[in-house]
Image: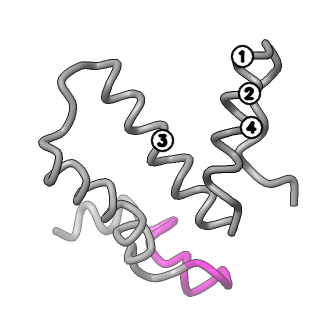
Amino acid sequence: MCGPLYDHRAWLWTFLEVEGVEPTNNASERALRPAVIWRKLSFGTQSERGSRLVETILTVVETCRRQSRNIFGYVRQAIEARFASRPTPPLLSEA
């Protein structure tokens, strides 16, 4: 057990030195929870294409949620841009 800890010593204690870095992965676990629940309740997808769609939609939903953006508004803009042959609006906020 000491070997892996020693190998990762450069970043293992980053949370002590950099303000804002959390010491646990709780935020990541909470962000993934809705996707895991969806997969369990729906039995997943039946194709690679379906899997890509779900992962994209769930990423958009979580990203918009974290930025306090309107999810449906963003998806509407993205669909309108696609049909108008315009670039997809940026998902990450400019700030």
Residue at mark 1: 83
Gap between marks 3 and 1 measured at Cα: 18 Å
The amino acid type of the residue labelled 4 equals Gln
Residue at 34%, 19% (x, y): give it: 49
The residue sitting at 39% across, 27% down in the picture is 52
Do callouts 4 and 2 mark residues in contact (Cβ within 8 Å)? yes
Three-letter amino acid code of the residue under disc 2:
Glu
Percent coordinates x, y for residue 63 in the rendering:
59, 56
9 and 90: which is toward the camera: 90
Pointer 4: what residue? Answer: 77
Sequence order check, earlier mark of 4 and 3? 3
| Quarter of the figure that contains the C terminus | bottom right
Q: Residue at x 51, y 65 (%)?
A: 10
CA gap, disc 4 to disc 2? 5 Å
**Most prominent secondary structure in the magenta stretch?**
helix
Boundaries of the magenta span: 9-21
| Residue 80: image tag | 2
Which amino acid lies under the numbered mark 1 shown in the image of this protein? Phe
Whether label 3 touches label 1, CB < 8 Å: no
Which of the 4 image quadrants contains residue 91? Answer: top right
Badge 2 element: helix
Image quadrant of residue 83?
top right
Pointer 3 or 1: first along the chain: 3
Q: Which residue is mark 3?
A: 57
Q: Nearer the viewer, residue 19 or 73?
A: 73
Give the amino acid type for the residue marked by disc 3 in the picture. Answer: Ile
